Amino acid sequence: MELKELEEKYFFKTYKRLDLLIERGEGCWLITKSGEKYLDLFGGLAVNALGYNHPAITKAIEEQIRKYTHLSNYFLQEPQIKLAQLLIQVSGFNKIFFSNSGTEAMEGAIKLARKWGAEKNKFNIISFDNSFHGRTLGSLSITGREKYRKGYEPFLPNCIQSKFNDPDELIKKVDESTLAIVLEFIQGEGGIVEVDSNFLKTIANLRDKYNFLVIADEIQSGIGRTGKFFAFEHYNFKPDICVIAKPIGGGLPLGALLGNEKVANVFTYGVHGTTFGGNPVACAAGEALINQIKEKNLVDNAKQMGDYFQEGLKMLQNKFPNLIRIIRGKGLMIGIEMSFKCENIVAYMLQNNVLVNCTNENVIRLLPPLIINKEEIDFALEKFEYVLKNLKD
Ligand SMILES: Cc1ncc(COP(=O)(O)O)c(C=O)c1O
């Protein structure tokens, strides 16, 4: 039986797979079994920050595998500690906890907030419409997008939704019982939508007045993607808790939550934990990833290549104003809002050897590896122009 038929036979139908059989990856490119090359502009949905088959990541994984692939969290683990040190240094937070995934890190953040608020009579968590925070029930309880929530009720109590970037509605919902506000500074699944600086000022003022925690979901936007190490740095805002995942294990499953001095002593022995979180091989790969990002100035590259990409896209927008509505985002987290549902564009780009992703129905989302260069961007722009031209004619 063909792989495709076997997949259909054995799997729950949760994923719509692309019709490609990948043999291997090299840099920003994926190569199929038949030898065809595809430029990957969504890079494992922001996981493959160094692209595919990066020698520094491969070396770190190989070396660690020969030492130990797992140790329980009863042991001190050198790879965990080295990665923790790097992440604390670049973020300025005080404490870290490693999980296996983004949604688990978010669950940890919700638990950390709950413990912090337990004796303060604070219990309401406010999150925003169109947000995405993961698929486990805690994370889903604070996720705004209806598409992911439908049919999974009842959710956690005391999770309140407010309109993103609407300070007046938020003011009405915050009071002494507010435990935390959770937000993506740039909403990813929601279509690459940035937070307003005015809205952030309101959040900062409310935090000063009511003393709650601000939790930044940097799972998609973090680790250099937006041209700063964390998206919140663009807005001069310091969250109390920050949740990261996606690229931090160099392609292996890893997530983390970071907290400031306000929450530094909230978790005590045994109150939170995980069997696999902070896997040493994933942490060794993560250490190699962060070192490469620093050594190769990949945060700057994300900014420069992101600007270059957006310039090219804006030229296309001038050529096709009826098709491209808005281009937005920062660094290599770019959304192209089309005037129509963009699933077809994904298919046409695939026919032209470029992989793009569509979110929120009409937004083409680009999350390429941070190592992408101008030639690769030119290739993508040329193909995009060709696709748009042929749509128009
Ligand atoms: C902003 C954001 N939060 C949370 C998650 C969930 O992460 P994971 O899929 O690793 O559980 C994602 C994943 O796409 C995300 O983009």
Image (cartoon, helix red, strand yellow):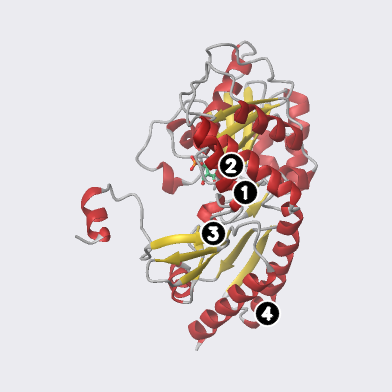
Q: In front of the other: label 2 or label 3?
A: 2
Alpha carbons under labels 1 and 4: distance apart: 41 Å
Type of the residue with mark 4: Asn
Where does the N terminus fall, quadrant-wise?
bottom left
Type of the residue with mark 3: Phe
Residue under label 3: 42
Q: Are marks 2 and 3 in contact (CB under 8 Å)?
A: no
Alpha carbons under labels 4 and 2: distance apart: 45 Å
- Where residue 135 sits in the image (x, y, percent)? 44, 39
Q: Is residue 276 above or below residue 235?
A: above
Residue 387 appears left or right of 286: left
Q: Quadrant of residue 106?
A: top right
Residue at 59 percent across and 32 percent down: it is 256
Residue under label 2: 60
Type of the residue with mark 2: Ala
Q: In front of the other: label 1 or label 4?
A: 1
* Figure label count: 4
Q: Are marks 1 and 4 in contact (CB under 8 Å)?
A: no
As drawn, the label of residue 56 is: 1
Observer-nearest residue: 79 or 268?
79
For the question of whether residue 227 can be seen, the reply is no
As drawn, the label of residue 318 is: 4
